[in-house]
Amino acid sequence: MDNDLIAVVVLGLLAGGGIVFRRWYLRQPRTYKVSEQVSGTRKLTITEHNPRFETATIEVGLFDKVLLKEDIQTAIEFIDKKNEFVRYSLEDLGIDEIELKRSDDNKSFSRTFEKRDLMRGIRAKGISLYRFRFVLLTDSLPFLKSHVFAFSTKYMLFRPDSGRYN
C-alpha cells in the first residue's frame, strides 16, 4: 500500500470516530441544578434535565431532616415589573403529567414535569414572561419559596440579576 492511501484511511477513521463520539456525547442526558435554597431543616432544589431538548423537564425537590407529615402542593408565582405576583398551582396551568417521587423514610420528595407543559399553560393563561419562582404550599399557605427565575431566549431557566450592588 502506498503511504498516501494509508494516510487517507487513517484520517477517514479518525473523522468517522470523531463523528460517532460527538453523536454519542450529544445524546447523553444533562442535568443542571439551577437553585438550592436552605431554610432551617429543609432544602429546596430546582433541577433542569436536558434543557435544550424537546423532552426537557423541571424537577422540584424537597429534602427535610424530619418527617414530611402534611400534603405539600407545588405552585408557581409569576412576578410582574411592579413586584406583584399571581400564584398558580401546577394543576391550574394544565400540567397533568406530574411525576411524584417520595423517599421510603418520607423525608424527601420530588415533582417532575415537562417544560413544554409549563410553557403551554403560560400561553393559555396569557401570562407575560418576566420573572417567576416555585413555591411549596401546605393548606394554601407558602412555607418555602425558591429563588426568582426567568427564561432565557432559548427557554432555559436562569436567575436574573437584581440590578443592585453593595
Image: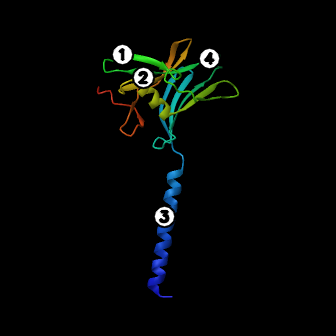
Disc with the residue nearer the chain's start (1 vs 3) = 3
Q: Which residue is mark 4?
A: 71
The amino acid beneath tag 2 is Lys
Disc with the residue nearer the chain's start (4 vs 2) = 4
Disc with the residue nearer the chain's start (3 vs 4) = 3
The amino acid beneath tag 3 is Gly
For the residues labelled 2 and 3, the Cα–Cα distance comes to 46 Å
Local SS, label 3:
helix
For the residues labelled 1 and 3, the Cα–Cα distance comes to 51 Å
Disc with the residue nearer the chain's start (2 vs 1) = 1
Q: Residue furthest right?
A: 104
**Dot 2 alpha-carbon crowd within 10 angstroms: few under 14, some 14 to 19, many 20 or more:** few
Q: Which residue is mark 2?
A: 125
Of the two numbered discs 4 and 2 in the rendering, the one whose residue sits closer to the viewer: 2
**Dot 4 alpha-carbon crowd within 10 angstroms: few under 14, some 14 to 19, many 20 or more:** few
The amino acid beneath tag 4 is Asp
Q: Which residue is mark 1?
A: 84
Up-down relation of residue 11 to residue 112 (above or below):
below
Using the image, tell me which numbered label, if any, was put on residue 18: 3
